[in-house]
Image (spheres, rainbow, N blue to C red):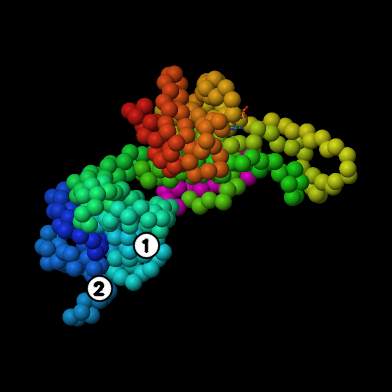
Amino acid sequence: MLNGKKIVLGITGSIAAYKAAFLCRLLIKKGAEVQVVITPAGKEFITPVTLSTLTNKPVVSAFFAANDGTWHSHVDMGLWADVMLIAPATAATIGKMANGIADNMLITTYLSMKAPVFVAPAMDLDMYAHPSTQANLEKLKSYGNHIIEPASGFLASSLEGKGRMEEPEAIVAYLETFFEKNQQLSKKKILITAGPTYEKLDPVRYISNYSSGKMGFALAEVCAERGAEVFLLSGPVQLQAKHQGIKRIDVESAVEMYQAATRLFPSMDAGILCAAVADYRPASFAEKKIKRNGEALHLELLPNPDIAASLGKMKTQAQVLVGFALETDNEMQNAKNKLQKKNLDFIVLNSLQDAGAGFKGDTNKISILTAQGEKVDFPLKSKKAVAEDIIDFILSHNE
Ligand code: CTP
């Protein structure tokens, strides 16, 4: 998995820097090409000579070579790498990365990096637990960086706790899993619907629901990270799709979403229908703002097309169709009925009775039901982690 992979290895000023030599050796043994970028503090813990000997490449530390003024281009490294790994990453480096403080070669390289970035923190347990470190790590995660959680154990401070950099073997295994997963969906085209729909009443009003689109966007991100070409059909949301593998198509109403979905689906390998599509739309659209006249107002609503059911009818043997069910009561039966009625292969159930599940938040708690009658429950997790579970589950049931 790592053979031929180009890895920028960032090393910072932590006692765990001595382990970077083992890390280099393991990566090189696996056939990777390693370019070390080390901070000035990192050099206090491990010498560039050790690292350049192991990697067979000069170690980069400063912006210029002192002897001849050669410019070390962080931009070129950002384009060259298949992955950047920062191990060990100190609290200071994590803070600089989170806040764009580009005062050394490693941070400028990080800011120029086009490839996925992995961070293996190494610090004392109290530094690691500090709210500022945790907030910075959360920020890095929100930028799409991967955090390789430190292990618990004996620390250089003689204390015991969480903060010890993960062992080189485990870091290498993490990267291998990443590259393996990265290819799982290559050459696959996946349609994902996300967010709410707006059903216009008049020029200033619409009917909608509380959907934020976060679950659908997380699924799009995970599918793209695993190599899929994603067509993200999104209702109006306040979100941005970050991955380059995502083609975003914005729509407003259920009818627009239906038209785009039915047009795209025949050329897709799978559809994941996460959108909270409004079931009804106003029978008529008032060209001018509806005025208040003190009387009761009766709205006539027409049923919207059911996108999931339509795609379920179009579905071929080779295609996979996944739906969602957000229920408030009689959850399991409702989800089963939807799975059958819409001819889905899987349905992801979330119940509003579970704290932390549903529309607005950053977490979700799901169960997945299959057309064959299997049911698996998952614990409360971040929407990104839930998206990983959903894709892992579908892949394990489609081999
Ligand atoms: N769905 C859809 N088009 C619709 C309504 C729903 O594609 N017009 C999809 C949703 O994206 C979801 C699944 O169908 O994947 C179930 O959505 P849900 O709103 O729970 O189901 P409904 O059929 O609308 O049932 P109800 O609102 O009565 O619970």
Q: Closest to the observer: 209 or 399?
A: 209
Magenta residue span = 242-254
SS class of the residue under badge 1?
helix
Give the residue drawn at x 33%, y 64%. Answer: 92
Residue at image x 79%, y 44%?
A: 286
Q: Position of residue 105 (x, y in %)?
A: 29, 69
Image quadrant where residue 84 sits: bottom left
Which sits in the foreground, 143 or 12? 12
Task: Estimate the x, y position of residue 352 in percent, counting from the top left.
Answer: 56, 32
Q: Residue at x 71, y 44 (%)?
A: 206
Query: What residue is shown with label 1?
Result: 95
Task: Check disc 1 and give the amino acid type.
Answer: Gly
- State the mark number for residue 62: 2
User: How many marks do you count on the picture?
Assistant: 2
Quadrant of the frame with the C terminus: top left
Image-quadrant location for residue 372: top left
From the viewer's perspective, is residue 343 above or below residue 37?
above
As for residue 173 lying within the magenta part, the answer is no
Q: Nearer the viewer, mark 1 or mark 2?
A: 1
Q: Which quarter holds ligand 1?
A: top right
Residue type for callout 2 = Ala
State whether residue 230 appears in this view: no
Q: Is residue 276 left or right of residue 165?
A: right
Q: Is residue 399 above or below residue 42?
A: above
Badge 1 or badge 2: first in the primary sequence: 2
- Whether residue 243 is in magenta: the answer is yes
